[in-house]
Image: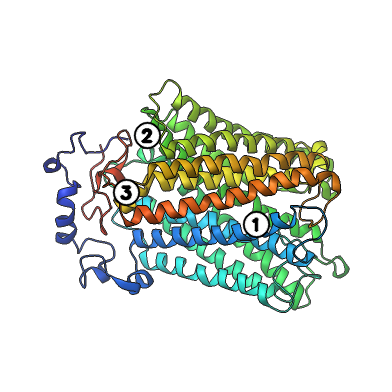
Amino acid sequence: MKTSKPESMNSESVKSAPAADAELGRANSAIAIDEHDDHEHHEAPSGIARWIYSTNHKDIGTLYLWFSFIMFLTGGAMAMIIRAELFQPGLQLVEPQFFNQMTTVHGLIMVFGAVMPAFTGLANWMIPMMIGAPDMALPRMNNLSFWILPFAFLILIASLFTEGGGPDFGWTFYAPLSTTYGPDSTALFVFSVHIMGISSIMGAINVIVTIVNMRAPGMTWFKMPMFVWTWLITAFLLIAVMPVLAGAVTMVLTDKYFGTSFFDAAGGGDPVMFQHIFWFFGHPEVYIMILPSFGIVSAIIPAFSGKKLFGYHSMVYATCSIALLSFLVWAHHMFTTGMPVFAELFFMYCTMLIAVPTGVKVFNWVATMWRGAMTFETPMLFAIAFIILFTIGGFSGLMLAIVPADFQYHDTYFVVAHFHYVLVSGAVFSIMAAAYYWLPKWTGHMYDHKLSLWHFWCSVISVNVLFFPMHFLGLAGMPRRIPDYAIQFADINQIVSIGGFAFGLSQLIFLWLVIKCIRGGEKAEAKPWDRAEGLEWTVPSPAPHHTFSTPPKVD
């Protein structure tokens, strides 16, 4: 996509040039979307109030990103408890029930508290800048959609301290574990999931309205960056499936507290129905957590290969087909529940089919790098690690999609290995790539290159030591979500736990790097990456509080 900015960065000839931007921002303050606070203070307001009341997309993006990082470390601490317990066979450190609470809350926090808010934070920060909009379309709703999140997770984490303990039925909260046998705090868990869902829906509406209505003149659909495309499609997925989750948790609530029998066979219900409803939400959800990653990687790979993205149109179509097909694969999580053979075949073939557009994407990224003049900056390293490791996770997913094989792998550590490869070395690595790629734009400073390499190599080695051996545990038959195991699994579990602790500690390097980058360092230019393209690189670094008060022209 060409922007109006010439390579020489000649500030006179361009509307959105760095020099002119601050004056334009003040002159056209009436045009700015959040005019309600523009007249009181033209500059960024200060103190705690700035963050509580902010309707500025950059501030809210920052809040989301910090919140998701805190949740990432919290969920990580729970994973450390799980891995410490599994370091040796036998029951060592925690009660089995508490172990189950840890596996449950770790899953919920990582999905709804770390990965999704991180993507929403990136969307808030980057989408308006990528499409040349002054802000998100619905700034006040934006503020609300963030500020309800801390309360949701406060409720969830507080439930661990109640008398019967927190949720202990896995993040998938299958009935009757969550209904008949769940702890008393189940109501708190349901309430917190509702709030998370509301936040996601509001965020998604905001993204859609912004992208549809606020693109700069000349930015047609097929000139949008891939990140904007993937987020648009993700937002539609969110609006489609979050109400389904809300329905599932509400039925769990009424089954447990109000005497209904949606999932109780004795009252005419069906516990397998719960799984159908849950996974109808659950499988599109996993694509919600990976599609923005595809967008990030599609931005980074061309920037460090010195080439345009190979097959831009096919990337857009592949993303759309993944989103549509994601609604037709949910029951591959349920092959062992006794489905009719026809149903098993249908879901097996659909799952095989969804691998095709995903493969198209991987092919296009590799083709973009092919014979490119590649430079290996940290964002690029994370993007390449993403492609390789995500592909491994994809292939283990195809193994799980084969019905007779799944009977062998189901509920073992093979499944855990599969989804952690796509979610940790997939989604989380892409978020880290995005953070390194856009940190100069956010902070105005370049990050410490040496530290970033330490973070990358420690993360990429430890993540494989952590998750690769799990495949073998699973193939040998070790069940998941169990605090104790047979002696033959002891050695591998020890290796896995060491990898886990190493991966957890590696993220502290990242924390240190980000704080260091915010506090100072080498000044970043408006375009720190020579060959990056897009409107976000036409505004100065750090990005001013208000950008694009006058929309840029895209040719």
Q: Nearer the viewer, residue 349 or 416?
A: 416
Horizontally, residue 62 falls left or right of residue 554, namely right
Crowd rating for badge 2 (residues with CA inside 10 Å; few <14, some 14–19, many 20+)? many
Q: Residue at x 82, y 56 (%)?
A: 484
Crowd rating for badge 1 (residues with CA inside 10 Å; few <14, some 14–19, many 20+)? many
Q: CA distance from mark 1 to mark 2?
A: 36 Å
Q: Earlier in the sequence, mark 3 or mark 2?
A: 2
Q: Residue at x 28, y 70 (%)?
A: 46
Q: CA distance from mark 3 to mark 1?
A: 33 Å
Q: Residue at x 36, y 28 (%)?
A: 306
Residue 415 appears in which quarter of the rendering?
A: top right
Identify the coloring: rainbow
Q: Secondary structure at mark 1?
A: helix
Residue 62 visible in rendering: yes
Q: Quadrant of the C terminus?
A: top left
Q: Secondary structure at mark 3?
A: helix
Crowd rating for badge 3 (residues with CA inside 10 Å; few <14, some 14–19, many 20+)? many
Kind of residue indicated by mark 1: Met
Q: Secondary structure at mark 2?
A: helix
Q: Furthest residue to the left?
A: 12
- Return the x and y of residue 6 as percentages of the image width and height: 20, 35
Tag of residue 441: 3
Tag of residue 80: 1
Image position of 311 with respect to 81: above or below? above
Q: Which residue is mark 2?
A: 303
Kind of residue indicated by mark 2: Ala
- Return the x and y of residue 145 as percentages of the image width and height: 46, 66
